[in-house]
Image: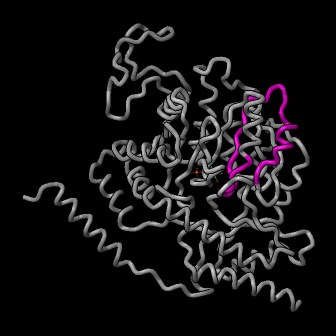
Amino acid sequence: MRDEAEIRGQIFELVRELQNSRKKDAFKAGESSVPYAGRVYDHEDVNHLIDASLDFWLTAGRYARQFESEFSEFVGAKHTLLTNSGSSANLLALSALTSPKLGDRRLRPGDEVLTVASGFPTTVNPILQNNLVPVFVDVDLKTYNVNVNQMRAAIGPKTRAIMLAHTLGNPFNIEAVMELVNEHELWLVEDCCDALGALYKRQHVGTFGHLATASFYPAHHMTMGEGGAVFCSDKRLARIVESFRDWGRDCWCPPGQDNSCGKRFDWQIGDLPRGYDHKYIYSHIGYNLKATDMQAAIGVAQMKKLPGFIADRRANFKRLYLGLSEYQDALILPEATEHSNPSWFGFPITIRDKAPFSRAEIVGHLEKSKIATRMLFGGNLLRQPLYKDREYRVVGDLKNSDRIMTDMFWIGVYPGLTEEMVSFILSQFRQFFDGLALR
Ligand SMILES: Cc1ncc(COP(=O)(O)O)c(C=O)c1O
């Protein structure tokens, strides 16, 4: 009889064969699509998924532990908590700051959290979900990140925290934001969902603030299908996040384990009877936002490829930048924040006021050539229906956020883009600008 290792080995070999037999269609300019993002994987990723499936552990297990440890090492944080999405990670990070375990420093309903108006809604939604008040300021064009002077002006007596994304992989001005954090004793949550691998003064984003988040949705720097993480270096915060993630329970045993605390039946908390099973003691209004071991297993395989993915993103960005530089009279090209090395999620472009064409025209031209374009998510979020009649404060006129909503778009830099595709993108810009000259 073959033993389990041998059988698994044969399955993995077959999967490799299958995966390698799937031929990629040759790129046909104008016919094949040029995506803005997508999964990049091979037989190793599929085999990891199958390995976890054969274990049939289903919930978080050995791969989740491995992933959390390797991810922590990669970004330089002490703790990583795997979640089922980046949005869940944002919800957990901010909810953790409301924990009674933080005493006077906890966020309370009505406290203000500074953020920007332009970006992705689930960076902001956790603020409202926790009955806190978002305070919106504008962003700078070129970096698409927070205007720190406006943020400074926005600080009021109720301001307790800052929650910001590193936009499209470009770090915000961390030094200036940290000055505000330290001066006013604020919490800082860094949303790194679009910025995995980005560096500020050679240090990974997400390791400056109190808590940080990542997303592993297929469009992002690496994927598990659905997935996300909260990471931090403060053990107390990590334990609070874990509690919110795992039903709000006080116990921190991993799935399938008992008595990690060594006194499972010996706790005396609040009005509970002495010795009530710690597994069923709840200290937070929590959720179940855990990921499965199948997701984590894919993550472990993707982590190995991550440095290469990030390098490819930077190289594609550079090629696009060089190729598009000649159109700077009409296009505002992106700018890396000072002291940073971005891990670009996309290549943002804003149409200059004086340009003789609209965003719709250039986006229409690219899309017609099957080159995918994207908006900066919700644009000026305050114009979106979801925040109507919500309590918030706005500082300034959000002029650039509005501009982003009407004149900005971005194209992909993801590792799945081949040299041929990048050349095709540039050729389509050329065609568009040549066409303008004939008008
Ligand atoms: C800045 C930012 N934060 C959070 C998220 C949410 O991540 P997820 O799709 O994993 O929920 C996204 C999604 O793309 C995002 O762009």
Residue 94 lies in quadrant: top right
Residue 148: say if magenta. yes
- Magenta segment: 145-173
Q: Compared to 233, does 57 lie above or below?
A: below
Q: How is the image coloured?
A: one colour
Image side of residue 288 versus residue 404, left or right? left
Residue 358 lies in quadrant: bottom right
Q: Going 44% across and 9% down the picture, which residue do you hit?
A: 268
Image side of residue 55 versus residue 368, left or right? left
Residue 9: say if magenta. no
Residue 286 is at least partly visible in this image: no
Residue lying at the far bottom of the rendered structure = 438
User: Which of 296/66 is in front?
Assistant: 66
User: Which of 114/378 is in front?
Assistant: 114
Instruction: Measuring from the top left, give residue 110's x and y in whole percent.
Output: 76, 27
Q: Going 77% across and 42% down the picture, which residue do you hit?
A: 176
Image side of residue 58 versus residue 208, left or right? left
Instruction: Measuring from the top left, give residue 433's x and y in whole percent.
Output: 81, 84
For the C terminus, the quadrant is: bottom right
Residue 189 is at least partly visible in this image: yes
